[in-house]
Image (cartoon, rainbow, N blue to C red):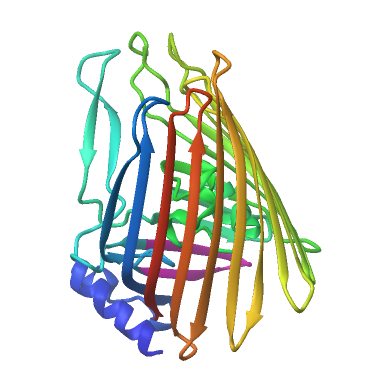
C-alpha cells in the first residue's frame, strides 16, 4: 500500500490533478539500485607482426547485475474481464546520476524522401513506455518496449539473466541484449498449459518515398515460450528491414532451454544471426545456476563463429563465473569474473577479462 500511495504522489507531482482520481491500489512504484567495483582489462593485436596492446579500466559502475531503474506500473478494471495497463520505466546510472538508454533515432524531415539522425541522450522512460489492453484474448501493448526474444526467451538460456556486463548472453546474441524498440505494437497470447506466444511490429517511421540507400528500419518478430514444472523452453525470431545497396535485412533466431534438477538448473541457448553487413553468426551458450552456501553459483560458457561474405571467419569464446548472496529478501551482494577472446585467421585478436563486486537492492 505504501508503494502504491507513493506512486500516486509521484504521478501527481509529475502531472498535477490529472491523477487525482487514480485509485491507490492500481499503481505500483518499483525499482532496482545496483552498483559495484568493476575492472576490465582488454588486450588487442592488430596483426601477426604487431605486439599485443593492453589497457585496464577500474572504477565504480552502475547496473552490473541488473540495470538501475525506477518505474511505475498500473492497471484499471474496465469490466467484463477487460483491463487497461501501462508501464513507465526509467533507467539511470547510479554512479553519476545520469539517465540511461539514450538513443540515436532516424526521423523524417520536412523534405519528402529524406531523413535526419537525431541523438536522444535524455530519454526519461528509456527502458519501457507503453500502455495497452488485456483480457481473455491476451494483451496488446503500444509504445516502447523490449522485443520478445530479449524479454521472454534469452533469459531462459542465460544463467546470468542477461546481466553482469560481459558475462551476458548478449556477448554473442545481440537480440539477447537490451534491444528496446520505439513505435511498437506487441500482442501476447494468454498462457495456456504453460504455453505463451508473442508477436510484434515496429514502425521505422522513415518518410516515404524512401530516400536512396536508406533502410526502412521496420521490425517484425515473435516467438513462443513453454514452462511446465522444472522445464522451460523458448524460441524467438526477429528481423529488421535494413536493406540498402550494400546491406541486407538483419535476422536473429534464438532457441533456449532450461531444466531445474533441484541441485542445479542447467541452461542452453543457440543463436543464428544474419547481420545487416552480410556477416553470419552462429553460437551457443551452456551453463548452470547452482545453490551453494546459502547463495547461488552462476557459470556459463559461450562459443561462436562469425563468417563474412568474403569467407573470413572470427571465432569467439567466453567463460564466466559468478556468485550472488541474499542479505535480505530485497538486497544481495554479487561477484563475477568473465574471460573472453576472439581471433581471426589473420591473427587479429581481442581478449578481455572483467571482474565485478557489488550490491543490488530492489524495491
Residue 220 in the image, given as x and y percentages of width and height: 56, 34
Based on the displayed image, in which of its 4 quarters is residue 21 positioned? bottom left
Q: Quadrant of the N terminus?
A: bottom left
Q: Horizontal placement of 139 versus 166: left or right?
A: right
Assess whether residue 85 is covered by the magenta stretch.
Answer: yes
Residue 77 vs residue 191, the one in the foreground: 191
Give me the residue at 32% from left, 78% from top.
7
Q: Is residue 344 above or below residue 286?
A: above
Residue 157 in the image, given as x and y percentages of width and height: 65, 56
Q: Quadrant of the C terminus?
A: bottom left
Give me the residue at 47% from left, 21% from top.
277
Q: Is residue 250 above or below residue 190?
A: above
Residue 240 vs residue 349, the one in the foreground: 349
Region of the chain picked out in magenta, as a range: 71-88
Based on the displayed image, in which of its 4 quarters is residue 12 positioned? bottom left
Residue 282 in the image, given as x and y percentages of width and height: 64, 35
Q: Is residue 30 visible?
A: no
Based on the displayed image, in which of its 4 quarters is residue 105 positioned? top left
Residue 44 vs residue 130, the one in the foreground: 44
**How would you classify the magenta stretch by its main secondary structure?**
strand
Assess whether residue 216 is covered by the magenta stretch.
Answer: no
Amino acid at each position: 500500500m505504501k508503494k502504491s500511495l507513493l506512486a500516486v504522489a509521484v504521478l501527481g507531482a509529475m502531472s498535477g490533478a490529472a491523477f487525482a482520481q487514480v485509485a491507490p491500489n492500481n499503481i505500483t512504484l518499483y525499482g532496482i539500485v545496483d552498483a559495484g567495483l568493476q575492472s576490465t582489462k582488454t588486450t588487442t593485436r592488430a596483426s601477426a607482426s604487431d605486439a599485443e596492446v593492453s589497457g585496464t579500466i577500474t572504477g565504480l559502475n552502475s547496473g552490473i547485475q541488473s540495470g538501475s531503474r525506477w518505474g511505475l506500473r498500473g492497471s484499471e478494471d474496465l469490466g467484463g474481464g477487460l483491463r487497461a495497463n501501462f508501464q513507465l520505466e526509467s533507467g539511470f546510472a547510479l554512479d553519476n546520476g545520469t539517465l540511461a538508454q539514450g538513443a540515436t533515432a532516424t526521423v523524417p524531415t520536412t523534405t519528402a524522401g529524406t531523413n535526419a539522425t537525431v541523438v536522444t541522450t535524455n530519454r526519461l522512460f528509456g527502458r519501457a513506455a507503453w500502455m495497452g489492453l488485456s483480457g481473455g484474448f491476451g494483451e496488446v501493448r503500444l509504445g516502447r518496449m523490449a522485443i520478445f526474444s530479449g524479454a521472454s526467451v534469452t533469459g531462459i538460456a542465460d544463467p546470468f539473466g542477461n546481466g553482469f556486463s560481459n558475462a551476458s548472453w548478449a556477448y554473442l546474441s545481440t537480440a539477447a541484449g537490451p534491444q528496446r524498440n520505439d513505435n511498437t505494437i506487441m500482442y501476447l497470447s494468454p498462457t495456456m498449459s504453460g504455453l505463451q506466444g508473442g508477436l510484434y511490429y515496429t514502425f521505422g517511421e522513415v518518410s516515404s518515398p524512401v530516400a536512396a540507400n536508406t533502410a526502412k528500419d521496420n521490425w517484425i518478430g515473435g516467438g513462443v515460450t513453454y514452462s511446465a514444472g522444472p522445464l522451460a523452453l523458448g524460441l524467438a525470431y526477429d528481423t529488421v528491414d535494413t536493406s540498402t545497396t550494400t546491406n541486407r535485412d538483419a535476422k536473429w533466431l534464438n532457441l533456449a532451454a532450461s531444466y531445474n534438477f533441484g541441485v542445479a538448473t542447467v541452461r542452453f541457448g543457440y543463436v543464428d544471426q544474419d547481420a545487416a553487413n552480410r556477416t553470419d553468426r552462429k553460437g551457443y551458450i551452456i551453463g548452470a545456476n547452482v545453490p551453494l552456501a546459502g547463495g547461488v553459483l552462476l557459470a556459463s560458457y559461450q562459443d561462436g563463429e562469425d563468417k563474412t561474405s568474403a569467407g573470413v571467419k572470427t571465432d569467439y569464446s567466453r567463460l564466466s563465473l559468478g556468485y550472488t548472496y541474499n542479505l535480505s529478501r530485497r538486497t544481495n551482494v554479487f561477484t563475477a569474473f568473465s574471460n573472453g577472446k576472439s581471433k581471426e585467421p589473420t591473427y587479429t585478436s581481442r581478449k578481455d577479462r572483467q571482474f565485478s563486486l557489488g550490491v543490488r537492492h530492489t524495491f
